[in-house]
């Protein structure tokens, strides 16, 4: 199962790692950021379709930054899908 690491920009999280198997997302782990919220995101997306996650999370804003850890994760998923 391919594993990916993405370095978010403009947010508190420093990196996010995840795997994609048959279009489904697994083993999501954020380094840094809002620990409780990002653990919840990781649990909620486990086993979900990567494209669906992108549709739900992309564009999510945190505090007027124009992005968020969830939005950055969606961007990372898009890049990973493009590499596959």
Image: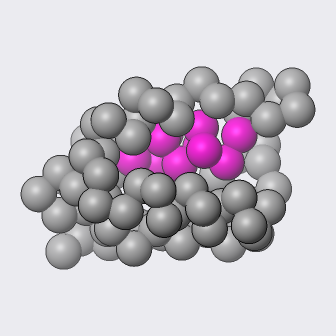
* Residue 73 relative to residue 52: left or right: right
Mark yes or no: residue 25 visible: yes
Q: Say which residue appears at 18% left-offset and 51% top-offset.
A: 23
**44 displayed left or right of 80:** right
Name the residue rendered at 41%, 35% in the picture.
54
Q: Check the image and report above or below for 29 versus 71.
A: below
Would residue 57 appear left or right of 24 to someone viewing this image?
right
**How many marks overall?**
0
Q: Position of residue 32 (x, y in %)?
A: 76, 69
The answer to whether residue 79 is seen in the rendering is: no
Residue occupying the far right of the picture = 63
Residue 11 in the image: above or below residue 58 = below
Residue 7 vs 72, above or below: the answer is below
Frontmost residue, 20 versus 37: 37
Q: Which residues make up the magenta segment?
A: 68-77
Q: Residue at x 78, y 43 (%)?
A: 10
Q: Position of residue 67 (x, y in %)?
A: 71, 32
Q: Main structural element of the magenta stretch: helix, strand or loop?
A: helix
How far across and how far down the image is residue 58, in percent? Answer: 52, 30
Colour treatment of the image: one colour
Residue 59 falls in image quadrant: top right
Q: Quadrant of the N terminus?
A: bottom left
**Residue 64 is inside the magenta segment:** no
Any magenta on residue 72?
yes
Taking depth in this image into account, of 2 and 22 the one nearest to the observer is 22
Residue appearing at x 79%, y 35% in the figure: 62
Residue 6, x across and y down, in percent: 52, 59
């Amino acid at each position: 199962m391919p594993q990916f690491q993405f370095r978010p920009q403009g947010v508190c999280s420093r990196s996010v790692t995840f795997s994609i198997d048959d279009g489904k997302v697994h083993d999501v782990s954020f380094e840094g950021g809002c620990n409780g919220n990002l653990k919840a995101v990781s649990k909620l997306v486990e086993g979900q379709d990567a494209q669906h996650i992108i549709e739900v999370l992309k564009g999510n804003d945190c505090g007027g930054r124009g992005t968020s850890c969830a939005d950055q994760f969606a961007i990372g998923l898009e890049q990973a899908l493009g590499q596959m």
